[in-house]
Amino acid sequence: MGNKKKIIVAITGASGSIYAKLLLDNLVKLSDQIEKVGVVMSDNAKEVWRYELGNEEYDNYPFTFYHKMDFNAPFASGSAKFDTMIIIPCSMGTLGRIAHGISNDLISRAADVILKERRKLIAVVRDTPFSLIHINNLKTVAEAGGIICPANPSFYSLPKTIEEVAQTVVNRAIDLAGLEQDSYRWNEND
């Protein structure tokens, strides 16, 4: 399969389902660069998606979905060679469990595997303000090799809609995952 990516997308119950939706939409468009996408959503993630987006369209993506307690999912082991995990949005509870090695569901287990195998973990955290506990957990995950990508949108591309604002965060996560995409680049777009 060459340099195609094997990506885990984990969606937690933090507010910000739009970020997960836009990421999944973009991964469909970038499928020529991807070998496989495995998705795991917490129960709270599904509830928040229904509340914030008003639908259950997470069921409509052409990816393999795994139950949050399915420890037989390929990416529960390093031998499956998934190279990238994006947790979007990433709740502080999930981040705390990852920081302390508590693999009590597939999301935290997959993150544990990604970190132990020295692969790419991208946590799109969506909470504010941060408590000192949050800051220490962010530091721990970063020191273990994870990338903390706060869901802080940028505005220099002059976004006009909520989707365009949210897309600025998703574009950063896609860049961090090493996928090639067309997106706004500072002082490179006319």
Image: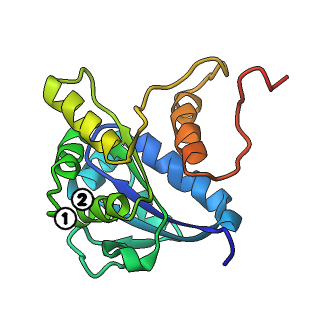
Q: Are marks 1 and 2 in contact (CB under 8 Å)?
A: yes
Whether residue 54 is visible, yes or no, is: no
Picture coordinates of residue 161 (x, y %)? 58, 26
> Which residue, given by chain and number where applicable, does mark 2 sit on?
108
Query: Disc 2 residue type?
Result: Ser
Please give the name of the residue rendered at 14% of the width and 63% of the height, measured from the top-left corner: 104
Report crowding for label 2: few under 14, some 14 to 19, many 20 or more residues within 10 A (C-alpha): many
Which quadrant of the figure contains the N terminus?
A: bottom right
Whether residue 62 is visible, yes or no, is: yes
Front in this rendered view, residue 47 or 150: 150
Picture coordinates of residue 75 (x, y %)? 37, 73
Total number of numbered discs in the rendering? 2
Height in image: 105 above or below 169?
A: below
Drawn side of residue 138 relative to residue 21, left or right: left
Height in image: 72 above or below 173?
A: below
Picture coordinates of residue 156 (x, y %)? 64, 17
